[in-house]
């Protein structure tokens, strides 16, 4: 099962290798990279773009409510926050 946050490492690797995320209109190259990076991906094309936009909006909402230094206990949540911060923070 792939969760929404499973996209984060692939998005971050793309960002690290290319220097940008082609936002707001995600390029075909970007979407192809994400699709190729995640085995058993259920969402493709426009559905994948929508999921990535949702992921960004969720992070920005958390950032707005909790700030730049939220009290995070679980290691996976710390990793999710750190990757999201590197992308959108």
Image: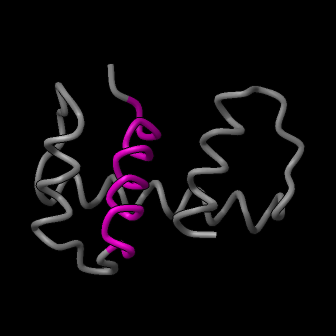
Task: Return the x and y of residue 12 as percentages of the image width and height.
Answer: 43, 55
From the image, give the main secondary structure of the stretch colored magenta.
Answer: helix
Near-viewer residue (86 or 2): 86
Task: Return the x and y of residue 66 as percentages of the image width and height.
Answer: 83, 58
Check the picture and name the quadrant holding the N terminus: top left
Q: Please report the residue visible at 59 percent of the width from the left and 62 percent of the height from the top.
A: 86
Q: Is residue 37 above or below residue 56?
A: above
Left or right: where does residue 71 sit relative to residue 15?
A: right
Find the residue positioned furthest to the top: 1
Q: Please report the residue visible at 33 percent of the width from the left and 62 percent of the height from the top.
A: 17
What colour-coding does the image apply?
A: one colour
Left or right: where does residue 33 sit relative to residue 12?
A: left
Check the picture and name the quadrant holding the C terminus: bottom right
Classify residue 11 by image quadrant.
bottom left
Range of magenta residues: 3-21
Residue 20 counted in the magenta span: yes
Left or right: where does residue 43 sit relative to residue 88?
A: left
Task: Return the x and y of residue 65 as percentages of the image width and height.
Answer: 80, 62
Left or right: where does residue 47 sit relative to residue 9?
A: left
Classify residue 50 by image quadrant.
bottom left
């Amino acid at each position: 099962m792939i969760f929404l946050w499973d996209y984060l490492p692939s998005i971050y690797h793309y960002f690290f290798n290319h220097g940008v995320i082609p936002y707001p209109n995600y390029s075909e190259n970007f979407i192809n990279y994400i699709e190729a990076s995640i085995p058993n991906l259920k969402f493709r094309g426009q559905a994948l773009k929508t999921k990535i936009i949702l992921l960004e909006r969720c992070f920005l909402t958390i950032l707005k409510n909790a700030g730049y230094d939220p009290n995070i206990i679980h290691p996976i949540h710390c990793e999710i926050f750190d990757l999201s911060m590197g992308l959108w923070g």
